[in-house]
Image: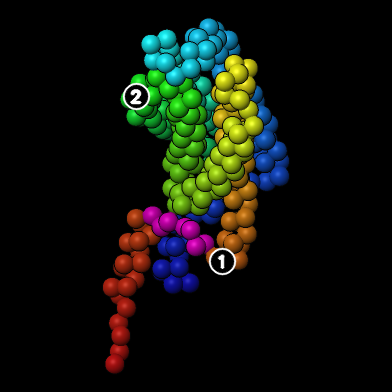
Amino acid sequence: MTRRKKALTSLDIEPHNPTGRQVMIKWMVWLIVWTAIAFLIFVMLILVAWVISWALNAGDSWATISPLLPVILLIIAFIGTFIGNLILAGVFNLVYTTKYYDMRKMFTISLLLNILLFIFFIPLYFIFAGQVTVLFLVLWLHILLTIYLCYSGIEITTNPNYAASSMIGSAWGFAVAVFIFAMMYKILNTNVGSQVNILMSLPPVLWYLFIPLFQTIREKLYYKFYSLWNNFLYIPSLNEVMVDAEDNSEINIDL
């Protein structure tokens, strides 16, 4: 075996290949997380139901909509997504110790992305504070992007060599969840308080379910390609790039 092959053998990282038992455990984790977050959001909605009901009855009149509504929705989105991502990372750290081994890194990534998106969405909540329907769309977009980016961030930092592959798998789940949510949005009436509560609880259910699910399916499928010596989405580390550069510099071409 050449020096290059020996170096690549020691540096190349095998993609994650979850077993059937691990997939089933992930299903249980997702069930726990989205049930807990949906319940948390439902409880928060009960506590602020008078503000939401006031806004719905007021229509799009800024004069009669409570100025507390955008603040309440902003806090609901931040608390719900942060607790959900924290639970997800904590359970994965306990169950999948070989892959999700660095709880501090996952917590930092989740907190940082939650704070950045929180700051980014603050102006949007107040810009559309006088338009109730648009304000709820901003809330759902906030929850959607936070869950997607935090989960993707955890996957990428866990194994950066397969960052592209992780993003593709998460994007599949993201697209399916958006499609289902769009269908539910068309079916449910946003002018009815009870149906608004369902729509507000639906994003964490869909995104915490479909994003990890499709990301795991992607892992299983991609490992099949890897087994056939086709590792097309692998991102080499700096050490591997340096090994290739050294080998290229040692090649002598005889004319």
- Residue where numbered disc 1 is placed: 229
Whole-angstrom CA distance, mark 1 to mark 2, is 52 Å
Residue 217 image position (x, y, % from top left): 63, 48
Choose the circle earlier in sequence order: 1 or 2: 2
Identify which residue is drawn at 52% across, 62% down: 231
- Placement of 198 over or under 20, stated as above or below: above
SS assignment at label 1: loop
Segment colored magenta: 231-237
Residue 86 locus on image (x, y percent): 51, 26
Q: What kind of residue is marked 1?
A: Trp
Report the front residue among 126 and 80.
126
Residue 122 seen anywhere in this rendered image of the structure: no
Residue 185 visible in the displayed image: yes
Q: Which residue is mark 2?
A: 127
Residue 234 within the magenta-colored segment of the rendering? yes
Q: Is residue 86 left or right of 26 when viewed as pictured? A: left
Residue 168 in the magenta stretch? The answer is: no
Q: In the figure, 231 relative to 212: above or below?
A: below
Q: Which label lies toward us, 1 or 2? A: 2
Give the numbered dot on residue 134. none
Q: Residue at x 45, y 44 (%)?
A: 156
Q: How many numbered circles does the render carry?
A: 2
Which residue appears at 46% of the width and 52% of the height?
A: 164
Residue under the point 42% across and 9% down: 64
User: The residue tagged with tag 2: helix, strand or loop?
Assistant: helix
Q: Residues within 10 Å of mark 2 (few under 14, many from 20)?
A: few
Is 2 in front, or is 81?
81
216 left or right of 127? right
Task: Tell which of 63 and 78 is nearer to you.
Answer: 63
Q: Where in the figure is residue 97, as x and y percent of width and height? A: 56, 36
